[in-house]
């Protein structure tokens, strides 16, 4: 269950970025980008089905574990191939690689728990249903709902 | 002692990371990185085992032999021009991914774009999609 973003809700507060850093020993895996004055977008791992980072990792440190793109730090040698193999630029390497691990060991990813705007969710159905409902409301009443 | 095959080395620093004795020295500037292998007398082959390019092998110690150094120019990002990787590393990524995954939906060969620009592109794409969604809902 990757984390889904409803960017129309994101207020660009960077709470997710900071919270992610806090629970990962100072190395965060979320980057909130400002798309001019139109939107703010938290960027992090999509846990791709065809995860190119895992295809590039020679040591087996990055691998698919169900829906999750998992990372076994003890196998990583810090070669940096994964950093170059992620189309979204969301693996970092400084000596060792680090990326979103969906806060393994916690019930809900920290960014999801933290977001004050409810922009992040692990429930794709709920996230897309909410977006559809809102779109319908907008169509019926106009303006942003 | 370590022997390096210059044609196979990717310039990735994996060997330097795993060496417990600081025998493989790395140096990086804005546009270059270099690796220097000191004469190693240890009974250890960690670097050999963990080289993704299979560029290293162990040979008998020879005091007359010179210590190898390799220098790589870093490739400039197609979009912002920042230097971000060695060419052999990027070629290696190309070789390990299926072709259809090497271009994004707009046809961009993202491997030759730096990770910072990749994140920006993703943010722009998501924003456009949202704006489009809104105008569809409220024409
Ligand atoms: S790190 Fe990148 S390539 Fe790997 S699963 Fe996440 S988004 Fe996909
Ligand atoms: S840095 Fe670590 S996780 Fe990334 S490709 Fe190299 S060994 Fe695999
Ligand atoms: S915490 Fe929520 S509102 Fe704040 S930047 Fe992250 S996604 Fe956006
Ligand atoms: S690990 Fe291998 S490919 Fe990487 S820098 Fe060392 S010798 Fe070169």
Image (spheres, coloured by chain):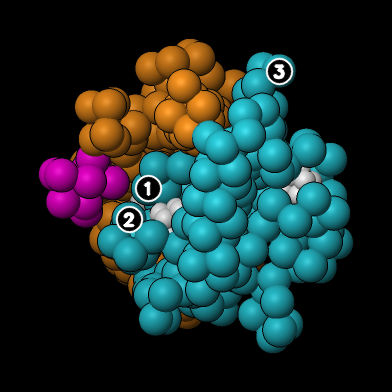
Relative vertical location of residue A53 with respect to residue A13 in this rendering, above or below: below
Relative vertical location of residue B138 with respect to residue A5 in this rendering, above or below: above
Q: Residues within 10 Å of mark 2 (few under 14, many from 20)?
A: many
- Which structural element holds mark 3? loop
Please give left or right for residue A55 compared with residue B18 in the image: left
Q: Residues in magenta?
A: B91-102
Please give left or right for residue A103 compared with residue A134 in the image: right
Relative vertical location of residue B111 with respect to residue A23 in this rendering, above or below: above
Relative vertical location of residue A4 with respect to residue B92 in this rendering, above or below: below
x, y percentage for residue A109? 70, 71
Q: Which mark is residue A37?
A: 3
- Give the residue displayed 69% in from the left and 52% down from the top: A119
Q: Quadrant of the C terminus of chain A?
A: top right
Q: Name the residue at the front extreme.
A: A140
Q: Say which chain is orange.
A: B
Q: Is A145 inside the magenta-drawn segment?
A: no
- Which residue is denoted by mark 2 in the rendering? A52
For the residues carrying marks 3 and 1, which lies nearer the camera in this image? 3
From the viewer's side, name the closer residue of B38 and A116: A116
- Quarter of the image holding residue B59? bottom left
Respond yes or no on whether mark 1 lies under 8 Å from ligand 1. yes
- Which structural element holds mark 2? helix
Q: Say which chain is cyan.
A: A
- Which residue is denoted by mark 1 in the rendering? A85
């Amino acid at each position: 269950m990757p984390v889904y973003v409803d960017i129309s809700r994101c207020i660009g507060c960077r709470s997710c970025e900071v919270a992610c850093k806090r629970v990962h020993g100072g190395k965060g895996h979320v980057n909130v980008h400002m798309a001019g004055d139109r939107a703010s977008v938290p960027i992090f791992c999509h846990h791709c089905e065809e995860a190119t980072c895992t295809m590039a990792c020679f040591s087996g440190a990055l691998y698919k574990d169900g829906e999750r793109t998992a990372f076994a730090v003890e196998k990583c040698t810090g070669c940096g191939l994964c950093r170059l193999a992620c189309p979204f630029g969301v693996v970092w390497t400084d000596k060792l690689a680090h990326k979103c691990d969906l806060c393994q060991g916690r019930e809900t990813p920290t960014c999801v728990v933290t977001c004050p705007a409810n922009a992040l969710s692990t429930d794709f159905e709920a996230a897309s249903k909410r977006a559809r409902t809102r779109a319908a409301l907008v169509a019926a009443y106009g303006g942003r709902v | 002692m370590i022997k390096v095959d210059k044609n196979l080395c990717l310039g990735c620093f994996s060997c330097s990371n795993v060496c417990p004795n600081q025998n493989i020295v790395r140096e990086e500037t804005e546009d270059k990185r270099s690796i220097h292998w000191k004469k190693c007398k240890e009974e250890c082959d960690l670097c050999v085992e963990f080289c993704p390019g299979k560029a290293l092998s162990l040979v008998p110690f020879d005091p007359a032999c010179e210590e190898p150094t390799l220098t790589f120019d870093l490739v400039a990002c197609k979009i912002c021009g920042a230097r971000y990787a060695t060419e052999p590393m990027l070629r290696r990524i190309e070789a390990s991914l299926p072709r259809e995954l090497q271009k994004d939906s707009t046809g961009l060969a993202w491997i030759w774009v730096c990770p910072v620009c990749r994140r920006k592109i993703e943010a722009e794409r998501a924003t456009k999609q949202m704006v489009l969604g809104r105008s569809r809902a409220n024409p």
